[in-house]
Image: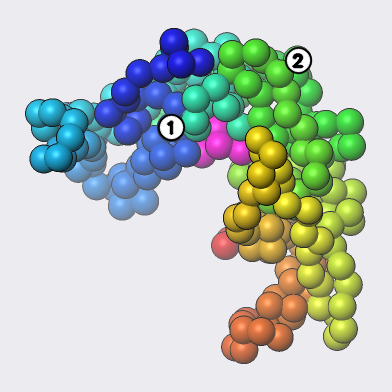
């Protein structure tokens, strides 16, 4: 892709949905009825390095122009999503953008979220939201349109994707949650539950050593779903090494249970 790439100084310009969507969804006036970030240029990005990079760079946005910018990136992608790094379009990373569109619609009376969700559903229906093992496909390559499955059954993929998708597609998430969860939980003493960690990933002949927060994301997932039994077991496990961790009261989860506040 070397012939297609170039220096990109604008941090929300392209291929960075993991940053731009979180800025987009921080609609301050949804929570506080304070419209300061709706003013032109209120969300501006400045960069200058006196060692390299040339003249100072200034990229003015506000919550409306940023929302518009991300919307058209979604449209140009065929609604499959926006990359978070060149050509890597992760399912996970685009759910905050959908939340941002929905909150913007609340403020403006628009219907961008509905349009994006309809297109997004169709695009991923074509690619397959789930891999052959029933886990969420990790990503699709923007250039080759090749789908990358969750081949290692990495807990963070299902947990992170399920946690964020739950806010707009709860029935689908709840349908697959019990089976996905059953493959990654490890029972312990006193009702404790831990998480299976997948083998280290290898890339270009080298082992990738990193912390993908598998345990933490599974705890978030259980909390968002409203599965208090699993959450209690996970917190029990965590409390064995982190004294003072709070525990929730046991409560049987069902797909129609209301999602608790987190």
- Residue at the (69%, 63%) spot, across then down: 215
In depth, the one of 147 and 202 nearer the eye is 202
Binning the other alpha carbons within 10 Å of mark 1 as few (below 14), some (14 to 19) or many (20 upward) gives some
The picture quadrant where one finds residue 189 is: bottom right
The residue identified by callout 2 is 126
Q: Position of residue 252 (x, y in %)?
A: 84, 66
- Residue at the (57%, 27%) spot, across then down: 88
User: Which numbered tag is attached to residue 155?
Assistant: none
Above or below, 109 against 103 in this view is: above
In depth, the one of 31 and 86 nearer the eye is 86
User: Which numbered tag is attached to residue 16?
Assistant: 1
Q: Position of residue 29 (x, y in %)?
A: 31, 45
Q: Which residues are magenta?
A: 91-96
> Residue 62: within the magenta?
no
- Residue at the (81%, 78%) spot, across then down: 192
Above or below, 68 against 21 in this view is: above
Q: Secondary structure at mark 2?
A: helix
């Amino acid at each position: 892709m070397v012939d297609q790439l170039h220096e990109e100084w604008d941090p929300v310009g392209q291929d960075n949905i993991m940053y731009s969507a979180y800025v987009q969804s921080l609609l301050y006036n949804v929570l506080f009825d304070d419209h300061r970030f709706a003013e032109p240029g209120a969300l501006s990005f400045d960069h200058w390095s006196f060692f390299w990079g040339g003249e100072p760079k200034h990229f003015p946005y506000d919550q409306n122009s940023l929302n518009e910018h991300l919307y058209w990136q979604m449209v140009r992608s065929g609604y499959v999503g926006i990359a978070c790094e060149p050509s890597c379009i992760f399912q996970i990373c685009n759910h905050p953008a959908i939340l941002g569109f929905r909150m913007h619609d609340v403020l403006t009376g628009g219907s961008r979220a509905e349009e994006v969700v309809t297109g997004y559903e169709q695009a991923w229906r074509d690619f397959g939201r789930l891999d052959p093992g029933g886990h969420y496909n990790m990503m699709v390559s923007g250039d080759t349109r090749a789908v990358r499955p969750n081949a290692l059954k990495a807990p963070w993929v299902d947990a992170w994707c399920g946690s964020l998708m739950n806010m707009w597609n709860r029935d689908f998430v709840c349908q697959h949650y019990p089976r996905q969860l059953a493959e990654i939980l490890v029972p312990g003493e006193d009702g404790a539950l831990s998480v299976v960690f997948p083998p280290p990933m290898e890339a270009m002949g080298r082992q990738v050593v990193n912390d993908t927060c598998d345990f933490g994301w599974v705890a978030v997932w259980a909390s968002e779903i409203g599965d208090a039994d699993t959450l209690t077991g996970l917190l029990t496990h965590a409390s064995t090494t982190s004294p003072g961790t709070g525990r929730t009261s046991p409560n049987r989860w069902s797909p129609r249970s209301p999602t608790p506040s987190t």
